[in-house]
Image (cartoon, helix red, strand yellow):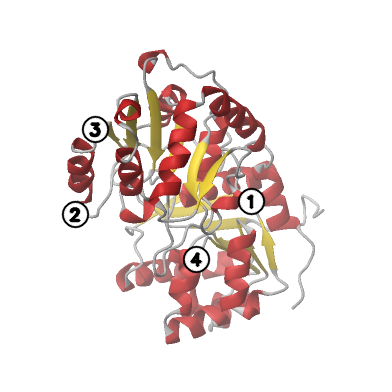
Amino acid sequence: MVSVAAKPPVYIITHEFHPRRGGIATFTEEIAKASTGLGYKTEVWAPHTAGEPEKTWPFPIRRLPLKGTHDLGCQMRLARQFVAHRRTLRKATVYLPEPGPMLAMMTLQFFKALRPARLLLTFHGSEILRFAGSGPRRCLARALIRRADRISTLTNYTHRLLCANFPEAVGKTIITPGALRSDFADSKPNRTACADKVVILTVGRLHPRKGQMFIIEALKALPPHLRQRIEYWMVGTGRREGYEMLLRDTAENSGVTARFFGDVGDAQLDDIYDQADIFAMTSINHETSVEGFGLVYLEASAHGLPVVAHAVGGVPEAVVDGVTGLLVPPVNLPALTAAFQRLVTDAGLRRELGANGREWARRNCWTRSADVLLNGPAVPS
């Protein structure tokens, strides 16, 4: 263990942070909290909040004048921040927990004056294939990985994907599994609002890769008497033009009642979880977009919900088939329909899988992941 006096400050530089939502933002926020709890002087750099009030954090946060996109202009603005604060960063641990800041660092890495004392990276999945698919960017990513002191992934699936595409990561990559958010509060389900219905819930952006359409089509294939017992709730919004309207039209003709909640706050989301009976998110891997893990599956399990999901990417490391939920082959409508029919008609199985999920979701903790990332044994050069 590194002594308190010897610990260099940690600068976590990210595009994914509150008020943005999603698994990567949650991961970044929780690692920042955990590193602070381990005694590191931690500071987060993140895009400006467009006038939204700042939450109270146990660490300082520097809001940067950029939108947090992956375009060249945003990369250049972030690169200028690196240059302006180079004397500070040279003496610190710089942690890039997602691809946005990695892109900015890729070109700066060749300037010795801009190299931090330690460089840590985290890969989540899709960015690996995107970096590998472009010749120039692949070369830059390989150089950045070689310079990194330690790299982490959330799952063994992503670890294998990274090392297969970038052999330079072999020997310096460790697993920092996701966990429940630190402010998660245990609650007892309150399903009286729909006592005569079985509520199936999806939480995620409205996008074809997240699989809401697969769920509607699978529910549509159920016998009429079962469709009448179901409500399908969707939380989230999306930028894909026309996709929400397509979902609404398909649901209207499916015989299943559907509700669209849009984006909601944490308190309302917890209440929605506690009124649901089944959680479903049937993500698919598509081209360079993969499901590396999915913290939302852990969140659903922690609320005592059995999970229905596709067995793709890192999902089998978040959902244990037959123990915390039911995994089905991707894009297999009969298998998906059968999984829903089994859970809708068997309340005892729902309770059993949900109870198992509550215990399963608590097996990891952010402090342990941050400790492995920051204090783990030295990796080969």
Instruction: Identify residue for label 2.
Output: 241
Give the CA distance from mark 2 to mark 4.
40 Å
Secondary structure at badge 1 equals loop
Q: Nearer the viewer, mark 3 or mark 1?
A: 3
Q: Nearer the viewer, mark 3 or mark 2?
A: 3
Instruction: Identify residue for label 1.
Output: 177
The tag earlier along the polypeptide, 3 or 2, is: 2
Q: Where's the C terminus, which quadrant?
A: bottom right
Estimate the x, y position of residue 185 in percent, counting from the top left.
56, 25
Between 94 and 8, the residue placed more toward the observer is 94
Q: What numbered label is drawn on residue 255?
A: 3
Labels in figure, total: 4
Report if the CB atoms under discs 3 and 4 are less than 8 Å apart: no
Residue at the spot x=36%, y=56% of the render?
Answer: 209
Query: Taking 39 as reference, is 193 above or below it?
Result: above
Q: Nearer the viewer, mark 1 or mark 4?
A: 1
Q: Image quadrant of residue 197? A: top left
Q: Nearer the viewer, mark 3 or mark 4?
A: 3
Give the CA distance from mark 3 to mark 2.
25 Å
Query: Taking 290 as reference, is 183 above or below it?
Result: above
